[in-house]
Structures are given as structure tokens and as C-alpha cells.
């Protein structure tokens, strides 16, 4: 029964005129026009309203005691409008769209409703022939109203992501209520860019950092993202690496392999790990040479202006002190502007020896994501994005590409903004 829920959601939106819900609009991926949406195809959608910032998918958090059960991965939650006084994030719809198999038959729709109405916990709910639906926006909240032949139901919605307006130079800043929501949005962002570049140039060059970023990429290896990406087009690099063997728990390669790369069908030749058999300087030179070959063979783009390699997407974490890659505050390496890859032997964050991309390489990228979660990062986030001028530039503040920086923050990291 519950598996038919996505059909219901699909029907629900398709019954609404031109896919709008009183100022809310569904966006299908890659600009698919609304009337071109195909039955029996999965779509990852986003929703945009006049009243809310743009939001992306997330879980249902029912407040109604009747629906305390949380949706598991494969079991869609009951469609909220049939439950009175139901509070849920607005992006519930997109969550359901994530796994959507579009149904055009109204038979599916009504049989689902019949089943719902026969469920014990909804015995008090009347039947729900939907006749109209719309969102009403208030500041931060909205209501979805459904008119049944017996009475009206109201469901409150709450945006679970906010966009902070910053000067253009500081990039696009998104703040998520929960890290889980951040992870879904990051997966969609990465998958969309992968698809864009794979289509445009038949390859996608992406650079990973170490630390918690890898955990934040976890949704990318789950449906629907894992199936929506052509992994054979991916070429994976590291923005920094610790000078340890590849199977050492401190190795960024090891972390990425265990939690990400081993779960995707990427050709092993497209994974460019830093050579762990070499000492720091030699490993940095070796990696730079490897990048130069790949630029020559046109796997990696090159900036016509600066000559630095241009990776399609760089995914950066940030340390509590505002470091990115292995470029630490007040360290001379942040001013390295000739080399592509350098090394540090006195890293304030252990281990001492590391290899790192330099800032000009990072800044040559057309897309950079800064993925930052946790209260320990709030001061540096404030220094980077807050209003005041700051005397000492943190490395994260020196990430200022010609391209687009998108910040993915959880609310703890954004708490001082
Ligand atoms: O290898 C590393 O240590 C990193 O690449 C480093 O730049 C990391 O991204 C930040 O320190 C944030 O790490 P956390 O997200 O774990 O705090």
C-alpha cells in the first residue's frame, strides 16, 4: 500500500493547474517542461515558492501521534494531507518525488485513497476526494489545505532550508536544519553538476577533501542519485592528502574509498590517488606531474588566463580554524602562487605531513562547494560570511574563484551569522 504513495503525490501535483500550488512550483531536473514529464520515470524535483526559500528534499517528521512511524528508505510515508493537524517539512514532497515512479492513472490514485481510509489509525478521517489544494505562505510557514466533501484539513509546512543573502563575492549560502538535509542537497547539487559536465564534455572532474565531507556525500551513493549519474564519466582527485599509506586510517584516500568510491561503479583508472610510496615533496611533485599529463590529454581543463588546471567541481571541508585543503591560517603556503600541488611538514592538524592543492588551483574551478557542519566552525563561518571586515584573512576567505561558491551549512555552523 505505502509504495503507491508516490503515485498519489504525483497525481496530486498533476491535478494542480500548471503544477503550481498557490505560488509554489515544482521544478523537474534539467529544465524538463512540466508537460513533458514522462510516466514511469523517476525524477528528482525541487520546489520553489514565493514565500519560502528554495528547498530540497528531506524526511517526513510527523507530529501527529497517529503517524509516529518514520518512513524507512523504501517505504514511503503516508501522504500527509489525510492526517489532520499534521506538521511536516515542506520538502516532504520532494523526498517522495525522489523515489517517484510517475503514475498517470487516476485508478492508482483512488485505490490508494481507499486503502488509506481503511487504515485503523485513520478511522476518524473521512474520505478524501481532493477538489482543490493550495499553499498559503506566511513568514517561514505555509499551509496546505485540502477540501474533502466532509471537511477541511490543514497541514502546516515548514521550510527546512534557508538561503542567506550575502554579497555576490561571498557565494551562495544555504543553511539546513539538519545535517541529513544538507547531505541530500549536496548529493543533488553534485549529481546535477556531474550530469551537466558529462553531457557537455563527456567527463566530470571532481576533487574531494578529507574529513567529514565524505560522510556528507553519503546520499550520493543511494537511490535516486546513484542511478542518475553516469559514473564512468567521473574522474576523482584529492585536494589534499596526508602522507601515510593508503590503507592507514588517516588516509583521505582510505576514507573516500571505504565510504564512497567502493560503493560506485567508477573505473579504477579514473581515481587519481596521491602516491603513498613517496615522501612529501616527491609526492606533491608526482601529483602535479600527473595533473599536467591529464591537462595535456584534455581530461582536466586548463584556465586560459592563468594556466592553472580547472576542475569541474571542488568539494571542500573547512576546519574550525578556517583552513581548507591543507592550507592553514598564517602559514606561508597560503601564498604559494606558482605550484599546482605543494606539501606541508608542520601541519597544525595531525598528521604533520600533507600534500595540498594550492589556492590558485582551487580558485580556478568553476564550481566550489564548501561543506561545513558543527558549532566548532561557527566563528570561522562568521569571519568568512559575516558583515564585518576581518584583518587576518583565513584560508577559507581566500577561496574566491571566478566561478561559483556554494556553502552548505548546518544551523550550528551558521549560528553566528
Ligand atoms: O585532510 C584534511 O584534513 C582535509 O581535507 C581538511 O581540509 C578538512 O576538509 C577540514 O579539516 C575539515 O574537516 P572536518 O570536516 O572533518 O572538520
Image: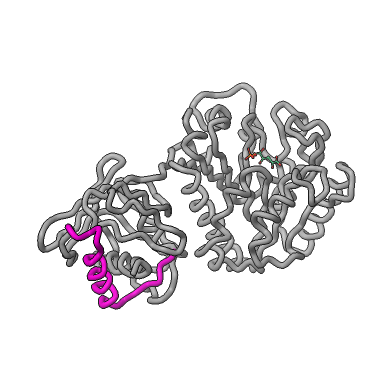
Q: Is residue 403 visible?
A: no
Q: Tell me which secondary structure the magenta stretch mostly adopts.
A: helix
Q: Is residue 241 visible?
A: yes
- Residue at position x 70%, y 56% from top? 257
Relative height, residue 58 to residue 16 (above, below): above
Relative height, residue 139 to residue 41 (above, below): above
* Furthest-top residue in this view: 391
233 to the left or right of 109: right
* Furthest-left residue in this view: 150
Relative height, residue 3 to residue 388 (above, below): below
123 to the left or right of 5: left
Q: Could you say where residue 90 lies in the image, as x and y percent from the top left? A: 34, 51
Quadrant assignment for ligand 1: top right
Q: Could you say where residue 129 lies in the image, as x and y percent from the top left? A: 17, 67
Q: Residue 105 magenta-drawn?
A: yes
User: Which residue is at the front of the view, 354 or 361?
Assistant: 354
Relative height, residue 57 to residue 199 (above, below): above
156 to the left or right of 102: left
- Residue at position x 62%, y 31% from top? 320
- Residue at position x 60%, y 48% from top? 215
Name the colouring of the figure: one colour
Magenta span: 99-124
Q: Residue 203 magenta-drawn?
A: no
Q: Could you say where residue 203 lies in the image, as x and y percent from the top left? A: 66, 65
Q: Could you say where residue 318 lies in the image, as x and y percent from the top left? A: 62, 37
User: Which residue is at the front of the view, 297 or 260?
Assistant: 260
Q: Quadrant of the N terminus?
A: bottom left
Amino acid at each position: 500500500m505505502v509504495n503507491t504513495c508516490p503515485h498519489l503525490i504525483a497525481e496530486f501535483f498533476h491535478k494542480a493547474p500548471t503544477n503550481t500550488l498557490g505560488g509554489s512550483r515544482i521544478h523537474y531536473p534539467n529544465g524538463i517542461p512540466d508537460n513533458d514529464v514522462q510516466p514511469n520515470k523517476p525524477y528528482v524535483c525541487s520546489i520553489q515558492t514565493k514565500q519560502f526559500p528554495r528547498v530540497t528534499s528531506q524526511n517526513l517528521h510527523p507530529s501527529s501521534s497517529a503517524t509516529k512511524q518514520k518512513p524507512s528508505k523504501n517505504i514511503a510515508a503516508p501522504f500527509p494531507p489525510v492526517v489532520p493537524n499534521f506538521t511536516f517539512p515542506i520538502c516532504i514532497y520532494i523526498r517522495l518525488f525522489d523515489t517517484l515512479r510517475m503514475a498517470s492513472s487516476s485508478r492508482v490514485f483512488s485505490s490508494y485513497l481507499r486503502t488509506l481510509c481503511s487504515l485503523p489509525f485513520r478511522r476518524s478521517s473521512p474520505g478524501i476526494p481532493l477538489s482543490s489544494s493550495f499553499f498559503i505562505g506566511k513568514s517561514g510557514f505555509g499551509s496546505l489545505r485540502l477540501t474533502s466533501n466532509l471537511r477541511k484539513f490543514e497541514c502546516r509546512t515548514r521550510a527546512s532550508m534557508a538561503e542567506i543573502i550575502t554579497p555576490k563575492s561571498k557565494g551562495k549560502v544555504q543553511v539546513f536544519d539538519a545535517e541529513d538535509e544538507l547531505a541530500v542537497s549536496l548529493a543533488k547539487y553534485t549529481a546535477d553538476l556531474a550530469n551537466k559536465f558529462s553531457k557537455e564534455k563527456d567527463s566530470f572532474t571532481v576533487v574531494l577533501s578529507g574529513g567529514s565531507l565524505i560522510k556528507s556525500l553519503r546520499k550520493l551513493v543511494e537511490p535516486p542519485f546513484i542511478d542518475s549519474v553516469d559514473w564512468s564519466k567521473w574522474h576523482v582527485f584529492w585536494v589534499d592528502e596526508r602522507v601515510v599509506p593508503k590503507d592507514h586510517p588517516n588516509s583521505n584516500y582510505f576514507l573516500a574509498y571505504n565510504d564512497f568510491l567502493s560503493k560506485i561503479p567508477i573505473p579504477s583508472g579514473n581515481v587519481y590517488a596521491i602516491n603513498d610510496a613517496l615522501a612529501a615533496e616527491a609526492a606533491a611533485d608526482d601529483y602535479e606531474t600527473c595533473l599536467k599529463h591529464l591537462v595535456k590529454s584534455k581530461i582536466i581543463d586548463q584556465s586560459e588566463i592563468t594556466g592553472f588546471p580547472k576542475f569541474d567541481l571542488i568539494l571542500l571541508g573547512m576546519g574550525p580554524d578556517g583552513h581548507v585543503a591543507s592550507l592553514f591560517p598564517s602559514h606561508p603556503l597560503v601564498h604559494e602562487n606558482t605550484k599546482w600541488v605543494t606539501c606541508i611538514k608542520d601541519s597544525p592538524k595531525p598528521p604533520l605531513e600533507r600534500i595540498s592543492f594550492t589556492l590558485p588551483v582551487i580558485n580556478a574551478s568553476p564550481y566550489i562547494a564548501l561543506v561545513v557542519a558543527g558549532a566548532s566552525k561557527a566563528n570561522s563561518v562568521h569571519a568568512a560570511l559575516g558583515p564585518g571586515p576581518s584583518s587576518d584573512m583565513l584560508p577559507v576567505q581566500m577561496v574566491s574563484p571566478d566561478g561559483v561558491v556554494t556553502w552548505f551549512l548546518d544551523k550550528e555552523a551558521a549560528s553566528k551569522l
